[in-house]
Every structure is written in C-alpha cells, then in structure tokens.
Amino acid sequence: MLYWLNESRLWPILHPRIASVVSKVAKLHIRKHIKDPELRKKLTPDYTIGCKRILISNRYLPTFNRSNVDLITEGIQTIEENAIVSRDGKRREIDAIVLGTGFHADPRTYMKDFTITGKGGVNLLEQWKEGAEAYFGMTVKGFPNMFQLVGPNTGLGHNSVIFMIESQVHYVVECLKAMKSRNAQTMEVKPEVQERFNDWVQKGLENTVWSSGCASWYLQDDGKNFTIWPGSTWRYRLMTRTVPTNNFVWKSKSELPVEPHSMASSSEQSTDFAVAK
C-alpha cells in the first residue's frame, strides 16, 4: 500500500497541470493548520509542488503553532557563546545548534578525490565534466566492468530508492552471470547505446515540474537533471530484469591488450577496470 501510494505521487510531477491542482490542495492544507497569515506565508513554498522533495509528515505544520517554537527566516548573522544573532539584529539564547548540512548529489563533487581510470587512461570525472551520464545509471562507456549503484538519473523524488538499488543489484548479478556464460573478461556498454539512452532520459524529463524553473539539488548549474529517473520505479525494474547483451561489447582475456602496470601507493593507485558504488 505504501509503495503504490508513493508511486502515485509521480503523476503530478510528470504532469504540471495535475501539479497545479495538487499545489492548491497543499496550500489549503497549510491554511487549515497554520492560522497566522505571516507564518503561513513563510511556510508556503514559492515553487511548483514536486520540484523539490515533497515533505510527508502530519506533525511538521502543527509544530509551528506551539508557543515554544519560532520560525526564523532572516538567517543567522553571528553565533555567540550562548546565543545566535539573526540578520535582523535580534539575539536569541540557545542551548544547542543542529546543523543540517545536506549532501552533494553531483558525483563530480563527491567523487573528486576518488580516481577511476578507464580505457586509454581516461578519467571518469573528466569524461563527466559536462555532466554525469551512464546506461541505466550503472555502466559507463569506456569503463569496462565498472558498475555503480544509484548512479546518474536513478535517484527518486517520489518513492524509495531502496527499490531502485534492489533492481540494480539484480542487474549487476545478471551481468556477471552473462560474462561467465560467455567466458568474457570484460563487458562494456556501447557508446551509441549510452547516448541513445540518455537522450531518452532527458526527453522524459522535459515538461515535468523538475524542469519548471526552480532551483534544486536535482539539477546541475546549467539546468540539466542528472539525478532523477524520469518515470515509475516499476518500469525501471522491468527494464533491468534482463541484460540486453547486444548493447555491450564482450571481450575474452585473449582479446584484451597487455599493458604494463607499475606499483603505486594506495593514494595514487588507479585501475583500468573498477567497481564503484
């Protein structure tokens, strides 16, 4: 029940007209729980619903009606030993600060100190300098035998990403089985297959609320959505149940080039074929 309830939230995200209706319902919900007009204004998002992660809670809004809770949107100017001073100059005594730093979703940021080298000495982050791309978020052209979990465009804004991870683990295992059955040492997605797939992904993201002009961690600086899967999770699972063998190049040990390898420290070492997660 929870799965299908969450999955139903995808429809307003994919269809902005439906989103506008849901947005009106959400604003009525805020009006119902928050009586103070000024407070209600602060708590009402100024972007299309679904553009950022939707909060699911029946305790969040009522919390702001409590006498011992203040919502301060001015921002903090300075932090003193026992107080904070907001930008409006007001000083408030405090006992503790909980700092919610968030996280980086762009692999070009969180993998900047993690070197992966592919064929011909190509660095993965250098290949991704214009934006991260992969085939079903798991395999990348030029990087044989590299499998990722929750890679580019397999994140979600409406359901549990664990469902996606389970689909991906199954797919990777099927890849390994296919390699074994072919006596292959490596498998690599064909460049044209990856490009065709990512063109399909980006087209699926057009005209959705994610592309409605808001700023969110789903988007890179130029507005490209490198994070979100543009459809239902059950569709992703069906598409990754089997490995489309014709979309990969399979090579046996005898077909691989012999390249000299030198010893390197753990901080300097990189591999031609790597597994990342």
Image (cartoon, rainbow, N blue to C red):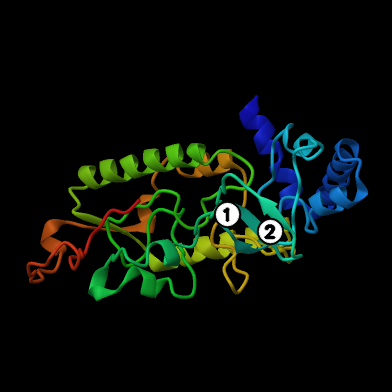
In x, y percent, where is residue 196?
51, 64
Q: Which amino acid type corresponds to the residue marked 2 in the rendered image?
A: Trp
The residue wearing badge 2 is 210
Earlier-in-chain disc, 1 versus 2: 2
SS assignment at label 2: helix
* Front-most of residues 120 and 184: 120
Q: What's the mark number on residue 265? A: none
Residue ID at (53%, 44%): 236
* Front-most of residues 260 and 67: 67
Q: Is residue 248 visible?
A: yes
Badge 1: few (under 14), some or many (20 or more) residues near its Cα, within 10 Å? many
Left or right, 78 with respect to 65, comes to left
Q: How many marks?
A: 2
The image quadrant of residue 56 is top right
Q: Is residue 193 visible?
A: no
Q: Which amino acid type corresponds to the residue marked 1 in the rendered image?
A: Ile
Badge 2: few (under 14), some or many (20 or more) residues near its Cα, within 10 Å? many
Q: CB atoms at circles 1 and 2 under 8 Å apart?
A: yes
Residue ID at (52%, 63%): 198
Residue ID at (71%, 40%): 9
* Front-most of residues 44 and 76: 76
In x, y percent, where is residue 266?
16, 61
Q: What's the mark number on residue 228? A: 1
* Front-most of residues 77 and 104: 77
Could you tell me how far apart the alpha carbons at marks 1 and 2 are, in whole angstroms?
9 Å
Left or right, 275 with respect to 96, comes to left
In x, y percent, where is residue 14?
72, 51
SS assignment at label 1: loop
Residue ID at (32%, 40%): 173
